[in-house]
Image (cartoon, coloured by chain):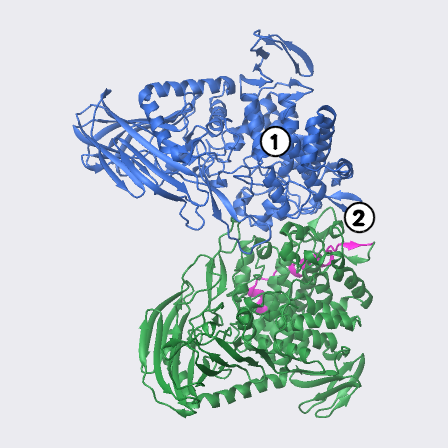
Chain colours: A blue, B green
């Protein structure tokens, strides 16, 4: 834990006191989003202190050129970046002619920032002593509307405390923004129009190269002590900016308020020619509703999200705040309504990882969305990959594979690979298995058997073809081997026979064959359509099975464990406990070659296989592997603690499970990795959710039934959550005295608790 | 072979006929240099066709920022680039007011370009039909003086053929040049003065960041039909350029000539404040001598180089041209007079590989310079590394090594690592062994036992300390292993127990221990000085020996060969002969991961060890390893064919040895790799020399005696060469009827020919 300034609170993230050193961290932590757009918690008014400006639009990216030392064949030509979009939140403020800027105030008192997760808004209140010694009180509230997802609303009030003042609000849109991480100082946005019409401002711009068209818009209203105030504005327009200045004389202790409506209309949702009229329509709806009604709508939208997604924890406020922060941020990032969108590892809270899609979605995020939303949301996440199958096939072709083999990219915005480290893009091929596993996981959880014949089977065939070709026969071992890979543990590169990859490949080959056989048997039309489309040859299935059945798995007789890869035991096997803390984190302290040679594991690798394929192994095997690998694991990936928490819980080691849980749930709030100012770790937040549901709650789906093995960390009184299982909502409340199940709807549900079948009738509390 | 336009000629590289498509290739092939500077064979006059401008000054480089996908600890911060220096060869020419430019002439007849290797000059002659239909004849000759190594001289003549013409010569210096491969479009040169004083022009500039100060200078003379002509010039000066225009009316069939003197004075050789006066001194000496005398000096200088370095081949003009081209380019690149300089893989012929120092120098170039120059030249090459020992220690510290362990950089200009691929800089650590081996090789060849106590021992200790720490103990194997390396075969990355690296490490540890013991025994003062300076601990030697004696070597019982690395036999072992030619070269056709997974070898790896340490292995072992590895070798490195040629000759396979020889000797002349326009492969040229001397001639030094096992390729009548062995020059002439030895000097020399001792008396031809 590297910081401790967030005030524990069950429903809000709260900061008290103004500290310039914390501004960038807080800009990340207090980020807001609505799935379609999001922004860091930058101040509306000018701020001359250290700040990281960011406002992002879902799906709007830029292919920044990659240039590396020496080019290697197959390198992607660009690295997709999420783009900092035109700033619509800005309000220049002048008080008695002087720019208002917190960095230059003589004093800032009673500063309080709150991200209200229950209702979905961000607020600040404080008193400031201006450079001239005069005092004001400020209150702001801002949210991005869930209902009108192109709209954001700001309520900004100033109350002169020491004397009457002349206050000018100058709301603006600024398209003269840049990315912090621009590779070549390229210009990302081309501004084609910056106009003011009446009280409204519009900036029309498009991204360079990708040509996403965006209309950024704004309109403002004014109030004095709550009463509407008609002010006439003075327009200021430049090439990349529009601003309108409104001035009022404000009596001492009067409250002068502006409500600013703003946001983006984008050509993903509207014809490019209608972006401005769409923006006008949004503004008209917003003004008609007004701030209070919009806020009420927002509260209702979040209430509905929480009703399904909340996890309540008794007796541990910090754990409660942590899990709600995770659930809140996941929902701010992705709501599942658009199959063209996906979940970037930093969501809308920073630029790192380019806002792109990683295997995180399939491996970590899918269970959360399956259980807390309607199933179509998870199906949209799968369909995203189906829509990109052609590009996965192209990607595999670039690397020399044939016959419709598909290699999904490690990092993508549109289906193309867009990462530029060869050891990641070329070697970290295990991601292909996660995409197949998600299809299996989806059908297992939802029981929706329509996805595979409609879309999934083609994906599974492409993936199986890839593994069939990628595994090669070793005459020395008389087995199929997979050489030159990077497993989930990115602290190894170019290893042979990474056990996780080999096991996942074998699983994919067998599962694809099984699915093809099932569709052939049960849905002749679908089979005919698909097999003709992908030109499935009669011998392919048996080839897949041959490779799967003769796959090589490195194994140590001495330790009775599968080896992470060939040669793992040649390393100096010093456990993390024996590594001086001054050497950690090794990714900051050690050179890359030293990390590679070491036994240290960044995140679950062999254990990731024991997580995905747990039914293939006994509890004793899990224990042996956990005890062998966890001591070498440095957990320097945000995705590491959650899997280990789940497995520790499964092994009944609740104290260890809880430690991992705390690390994952408050990773950002407590800034464990000293980097929260760069943005939040969104995808690992779904892992936090899994730590409770699958870890402490022990929830699994086996043979179409929900299973639970509930446990409670010693630090808690109890906890409760809901899951949507095949259209029925089950509330689970784990208490020390027992576990209560409560079912919404009108038909009973059979579940398995601690290996015992229980029938839960609807609307009746069952205690086990 | 991809081109065939160079006319076979024993002493010259000749091109006939003007072809715009060949201009960039010829600019490389006809490059000239004098060890201190060099330049591509760009035309003096304007040329608007495709051209790659390049003029380079030894030791003048620029640290271009590296930026890679994701930074890894230990990455070098820059990639050193050789810099294109201000152009002093340029002469704008106007004929009757029109710019003369070969690209826009109506016709170019009897075009002939000659690089006269015997005398060290470059010439062009041709007749041109100008755009206006008029005809001229042009003759140029240019050289960079060996004696005055800051000076270059151009003789440029035009003869109007169809009518009298007004001809303006406008010699200039242009500092407005750029590099083709600039990473960030950085400006590399800052010009501080561009002045004309009388008939002389000077441009003062310094490199950005590295701040090398350079004065580029010029002065011209004029002649009409050979008689001096006094012309008054018109000066034209801009910020980055000086030019002086001289005009004459030239009668039909009169020859109007300009002689331009130019070059660079640099602050490596003069105080920065005296660069201009040094330039004036050079110009005065040049003018006083005049073109003809300077050319005569040049011829004499080259005669003296050839007297020692020439290899004469009977009965094979293309082979003769090839080897002389190699020897000529090596001497143009490095003459060994300055221990601050070294041998860049492309010499002064292009920008690629940054003009930096690689292990090529120690592994490939040293034998050539030892045998064809005075021994101090080779000693200078060793001293270069001694001077950089502190930085090698710093480099190792950056990677986590301690106690004065030294890791020499893979690529350097000043001792710092300046390459930016982690798999090269962090992993290709075998270069450290080549630097130790060169010390051994130098003492073995020269018998100079003073280098080790004076300088070499500190280097050897630093290197031994590195290997001692870099090898780690595998409890599984009960041996020391070296994990995570790249061997000489760069088509593998991050492998474990690369046999070559492990063997070379073992050798270094043992050799360093032996040298320490020898110095301790024989030179107490040196031992006391060194052991105190490097804080040599009493247990270190035994630690080195422990690691060396328990080093692990991967071995295949089945094939009875050492394995290139752990797991090599798991690859799909398809030989190059069975690889479709459409797939080659694999570095152009295959993605990087596919190359890594394949068994294909870029250049000698295991066999490199059999080359360096040949006495440790039997002929049968060599044969077995050659037969196992060569079939997987694609020879896509210019450094590959020479080692294989030497080993094929040792195995008595002269036909194969000859094929490899041709490939190495005419690599650039015939453009085997389709890239000669980027520059020449200078360091591999020393390998060509070794192919004849060590391969065909079988020359070795054993127990302080020269050994020979002479063979002749079937295609040759015979060949002869000289070697300087410990101050005595031995001429060896291998003929079908026997081998002749002739010794200069005044004392006899015992040599071993085909395992028989022969005493060669001075100045007496001995035939064996």
Which image quadrant is residue B712 in? bottom right
Question: Please, what secondary structure does the residue beneath circle 1 have?
Answer: helix
Tell me where residue A637 appears, x and y as whole percent.
55, 38
Tell me where residue A362 appears, x and y as whole percent.
59, 32
Which residue is the site of mark 2? A475
| Mark whose residue sits in front, 2 or 1 | 2
Instruction: Give the vertical position of A664 relative to A566 (above or below).
Output: above
Tell me where residue A177 appears, x and y as whole percent.
36, 42
Q: Identify the residue at image location x=59%, y=28%.
A: A645
Question: Please, what secondary structure does the residue beneath circle 2 have?
Answer: loop
Q: Is B340 placed left or right of A125 in the picture?
A: right
Q: Is residue A750 visible?
A: yes
Is B554 in the magenta? yes
Q: Nearer the viewer, residue B718 or A526?
A: A526
- Mark 2, residues whose alpha carbon is within 10 Å: few (<14), some, or many (≥20)? some
Is A682 in the magenta? no
Instruction: Give the vertical position of A540 relative to A527 (above or below).
Output: below
Q: Nearer the viewer, residue A308 or A541?
A: A541
Which residue is the site of mark 1? A644
Tell me where residue B678 appears, x and y as whole percent.
55, 66
The chain carrying label 2 is A
Instruction: Give the vertical position of B566 relative to B353 (above or below).
Output: above
Mark before the other along the chain sequence, 2 or 1:
2
The chain carrying label 1 is A
- Mark 1, residues whose alpha carbon is within 10 Å: few (<14), some, or many (≥20)? many
Instruction: Give the vertical position of B106 relative to A666 (above or below).
Output: below
Region rendered in magenta: B528-557
Which image quadrant is residue A174 in? top left
Q: CA distance from mark 2 to mark 1?
A: 37 Å
> Looking at the rendering, in which quadrant would you find the C terminus of chain A?
top right
Q: Nearer the viewer, residue A264 or A213?
A: A213
């Amino acid at each position: 834990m590297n910081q401790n300034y967030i005030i524990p609170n069950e429903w809000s993230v709260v900061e008290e006191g103004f500290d310039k050193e914390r501004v960038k961290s807080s800009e990340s932590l207090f980020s807001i989003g609505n799935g379609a757009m999001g922004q860091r918690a930058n101040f509306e008014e000018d701020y001359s202190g250290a700040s990281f400006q960011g406002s992002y639009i879902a799906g709007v990216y830029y292919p920044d050129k990659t240039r590396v030392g020496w080019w290697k064949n197959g390198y992607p030509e660009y690295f997709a970046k999420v783009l900092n979009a035109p700033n619509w939140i800005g309000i220049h403020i002048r008080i008695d002619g002087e720019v208002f800027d917190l960095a230059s105030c003589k004093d800032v008192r009673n500063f309080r920032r709150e991200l209200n997760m229950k209702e979905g808004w961000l607020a600040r209140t404080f008193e400031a002593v201006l450079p001239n010694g005069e005092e004001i009180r400020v209150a702001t509230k801002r949210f991005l509307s869930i209902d009108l997802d192109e709209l954001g609303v700001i309520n900004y009030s100033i109350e002169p405390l020491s004397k009457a003042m002349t206050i000018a609000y100058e709301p603006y849109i600024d398209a003269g923004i840049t990315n912090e991480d621009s590779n070549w100082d390229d210009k990302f946005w081309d501004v084609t129009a910056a106009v003011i019409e009446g009280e409204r401002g519009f900036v029309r711009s498009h991204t360079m190269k990708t040509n996403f068209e965006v209309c950024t818009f704004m309109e403002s209203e004014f109030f004095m002590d709550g009463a509407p105030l008609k002010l006439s504005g003075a327009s200021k327009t430049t090439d990349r900016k529009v601003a309108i200045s409104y001035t009022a004389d404000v009596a001492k202790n009067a409250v002068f308020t502006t409500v600013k409506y703003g946001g983006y209309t984008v050509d993903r949702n509207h014809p490019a020619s209608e972006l401005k009229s769409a923006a006008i329509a949004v503004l008209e709806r917003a003004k008609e509703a007004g701030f209070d009604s919009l806020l009420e709508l927002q509260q209702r939208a979040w209430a509905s999200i929480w009703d399904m997604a909340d996890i309540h924890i008794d007796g541990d406020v910090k754990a409660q705040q942590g899990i709600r922060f995770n659930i809140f941020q996941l929902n701010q990032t992705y709501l599942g309504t658009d199959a063209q969108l996906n979940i970037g590892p930093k969501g809308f809270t920073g630029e790192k990882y380019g806002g792109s899609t990683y295997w995180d979605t399939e491996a970590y995020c899918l269970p959360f969305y399956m259980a807390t939303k309607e199933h179509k949301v998870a199906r949209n996440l799968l369909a995203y990959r189906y829509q990109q199958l052609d590009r996965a096939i192209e990607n595999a072709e670039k690397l020399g594979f044939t016959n419709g083999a598909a290699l999904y990219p490690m990092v993508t915005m549109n289906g193309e690979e867009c990462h530029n480290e060869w050891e990641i893009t070329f070697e970290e091929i295990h991601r292909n298995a996660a995409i197949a596993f998600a299809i299996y996981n989806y059908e297992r959880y939802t029981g929706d058997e329509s996805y595979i014949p409609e879309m999934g089977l083609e994906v599974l065939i492409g993936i199986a073809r890839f593994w069939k070709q990628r595994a090669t026969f070793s005459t020395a071992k008389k087995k199929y081997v997979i050489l030159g890979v990077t497993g989930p543990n990115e602290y190894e590169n170019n290893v042979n026979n990474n056990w996780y990859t080999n096991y996942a490949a074998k699983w994919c080959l067998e599962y694809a064959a099984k699915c093809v056989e099932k569709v052939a048997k049960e849905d002749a039309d679908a089979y005919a359509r698909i097999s003709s489309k992908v030109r499935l040859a009669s011998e392919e299935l048996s080839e897949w099975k041959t490779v799967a059945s003769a796959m090589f798995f490195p194994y140590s007789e001495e330790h009775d464990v599968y080896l992470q890869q060939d040669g793992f035991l040649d390393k100096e096997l010093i456990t993390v406990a024996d590594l001086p803390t001054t050497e950690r984190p090794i990714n900051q302290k050690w050179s890359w070659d030293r990390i590679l040679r070491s036994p240290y594991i960044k995140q679950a690798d062999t254990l990731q296989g024991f997580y995905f394929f747990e039914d293939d192994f006994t509890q004793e095997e899990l224990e042996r592997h956990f005890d062998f690998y966890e001591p070498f694991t440095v957990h320097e990936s945000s995705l590491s603690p959650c899997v280990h928490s789940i497995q520790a819980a499964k092994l009944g080691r609740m104290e260890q499970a809880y430690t991992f849980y705390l690390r994952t749930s408050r990773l950002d709030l407590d800034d464990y990795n000293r980097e929260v100012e760069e943005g939040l770790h969104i995808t690992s937040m779904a892992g936090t959710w899994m730590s409770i549901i699958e870890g402490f709650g022990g929830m699994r789906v086996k043979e179409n039934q929900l299973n639970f093995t509930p446990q409670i960390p010693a630090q808690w009184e109890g906890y409760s959550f809901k899951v949507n299982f095949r259209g029925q909502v089950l509330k689970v409340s784990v208490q020390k005295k027992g576990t209560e199940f409560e079912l919404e709807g009108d038909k009973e549900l059979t579940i398995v608790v601690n290996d015992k079948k229980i029938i839960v009738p609807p609307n009746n509390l069952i205690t086990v």
